[in-house]
Image (tube, grey):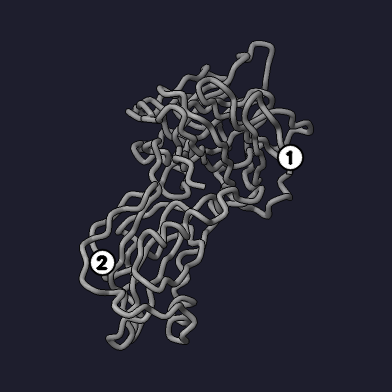
Amino acid sequence: MRYSTHSIFPVLWGAVAILSGFVHGASVSPAGTPPAFVKPVFAIRNKTDFSSIFSDIKNHKVTPLHSGSLAARDLPPAPQFFNLVFPGPLDAANNAPGYMGYVSLPTYDVNACAEQCNTRAYQAPLGSSDGPCIYFNLWTAVVNGTPTANICSLYNTNTNSSTATNTGQGDLVVTNSLGYSRISLIQDGSFQDYTCVITQNNGCPYMPSIYWSRFYVYDYEYVLIDDFGGRSGTAAALFIFVPPTPTSPGYGSTLTYSLPLGTVAGQTYVISLFVTNSNLYPPPTDLTGPTLSVLWNGVDVLDAVQVGPETFNGLTYYNIQATVVAQGGDTFVLRNGIDFPHAIYAVDISLFQKWF
């Protein structure tokens, strides 16, 4: 693992290489990707492991319930740092990607489940696609009519009631299912506000959005919202820089968050996003700069730098994070690198109040 330090913030960098097909010297267009650009294959991530959960419940490998834990109650308030995602309770549990395991609780306690999410390691190992815990689903298993276990399932990807599809198995039924998502001050960090209308092979134009605005220099480098499958949706931001020439710009294109962030001066926040490695072929022999940088109030606080394709066994996205302190009226910008040609994706961009 390599670390680089800017003036006031630590920077973690790493990469996962599974992209290929960028044509050296090819020009780009604001309406689409370069000719012969090949999208990466999105790595399949495991969904909720109900087979293990149900087996543990039926084999009494879960925490016994306290007497009276399912007494009549009002809908519990959302814990600190979280929002209730779907009304309920529902009689079905989330079957969603990004599953991080489960914990059984003695009582039906959303705050205890939130604490399980909060205490998960917030910094993923270099090259990991995990990221922080940002969603939990709390539900009760009833076996043969008897409340048997309170299950707290944890996820590193947001979801909603659309994935609450598992109602149980045989004499085990799901009840009291509620889902909570960690609050991000960045809206549409997965670029779902965009509609991709393909105008060239594997590409679509950048459509206007109230959340993000871009700056780019035509024919050298730009930012594109693409229909490549994101971690939690159907789009991702594509940052491209073609091979440098004597007339190349001396600065990177940018994608700027347009809405006020609503940060509180003096409060500490966590920036979290997922990026891919570049799809250069042949790869540059001297990778000396970032493919993407995060600017917080104009200061570079986090860099993603490409490393060897053999390192991370074909994971599509990897997580990078930085901790920052708000000044009030803060700005958030993603800046494209210009040190060497590349084409990378960024998605699931979040700004969380620090919880650890």
Q: Nearer the viewer, residue 203 or 70?
A: 70
Mark 2 or mark 1, which has the lower sequence index?
Answer: 1
| Circle 1 SS class | loop
- Secondary element under disc 2, as helix, strand or loop, is loop
Q: Residue furthest top?
A: 247
Using residue 341 as the reference point, say whether residue 209 is left or right of it: left
Please give left or right for residue 210 compared with residue 314 in the image: left
**Residue matched to label 2:** 90
As drawn, 154 above or below 157: below
Vertical placement of residue 191 versus 326, above or below: below
Q: Position of residue 113 (x, y in %)?
A: 41, 62
The 10 Å Cα crowd at callout 2, few under 14, some 14 to 19, many 20 or more, is some
The residue that disc 1 covers is: 2
- In the image, what residue occupies the spot 73% across and 44% down? 1
* Residue nearest the observer in this picture, 68 or 323: 68
Residue at point 41% right, 62% down?
A: 112
The mark found on residue 178 in the picture is none
Residue 121 in which image quadrant: bottom right
The residue at 46%/24% (across/down) is 327
Circle 1: is it few (<14), some (14-19), or many (20+) Cα within 10 Å? few
Q: Residue 151: x, y in percent? A: 40, 71
Q: Amino acid at mark 1?
A: Arg
Tag 2 and tag 1, C-beta contact below 8 Å: no
